[in-house]
Image: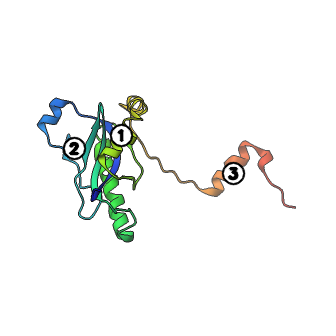
Amino acid sequence: MSDTSCYVYGIIRARSAAARTRGSDAVREKDGVLPAGVGDPPCRPRTARYQELAALLSDVPADYHPEGSGVRGMRRDMRAHGNVLNHVIACRTILPFRFGVVFPSQEFLVSHVLEPQYQCFMRSLDQLDGTVELTLRATYVEPRALEEVVAANPRRRSTPP
């Protein structure tokens, strides 16, 4: 049994053979090596390939659990997870995994996730290629919003009993 597991950030297209020979197993992007990943001490993210897919992952201890280091450790790891994804999404299409996904080994990840879901992941990457993700937050002033709803549909007005 291995003493490490693999923490997964997401799925990307694998780099070409020529691009891989110019870099190491660590994932390199336009502005350098990815930020440190989860864990204490954190490991640099790397990839596990299956054909044209690559899972972006970090090695973690076999007994790693996101809440295992308490609230501070979980916050640190959530921040690291977000930093890695934000770094990649700035220049590549990625199918992000939710925070805290761990597989027992790289081989298990390839054989039980990448290989059986290959076509689905490739279709999703094709559909998302060239798109951007935006987060929009809005607030409203409740009395004014209610006035607008009532004005648009007077039957919504309630009358006191």
Alpha carbon of mark 2 to alpha carbon of mark 1: how far? 21 Å
In the depicted view, which residue is nearer to us: 98 or 88?
98
Alpha carbon of mark 3 to alpha carbon of mark 2: how far? 53 Å
Q: Earlier in the sequence, mark 3 or mark 2?
A: 2
Query: Mark 1 near mark 3, Cβ–Cβ under 8 Å?
Result: no
Give me the disc on residue 111: 1
Q: Residue furthest front?
A: 1
Q: Quadrant of residue 129?
A: top left
Q: Position of residue 29 (x, y in %)?
A: 21, 41
Instruction: Give the residue pinned by disc 3.
Output: 147
Residue at x 37% of width, y 64% of height: 74
At label 3, which amino acid type do we have? Glu
In the depicted view, which residue is nearer to us: 47 or 78?
47
Q: Position of residue 67 (x, y in %)?
A: 40, 66
Circle 1 packing at 10 Å, graded few (<14), some (14-19), many (20+), is: few
At label 2, which amino acid type do we have? Val
Q: Which quarter of the figure is the C terminus placed in?
A: bottom right
Residue at x 83% of width, y 56% of height: 159
Residue at x 33% of width, y 48% of height: 85
Q: Which quarter of the figure is the N terminus placed in?
A: bottom left
Does 147 appear above or below 115?
A: below
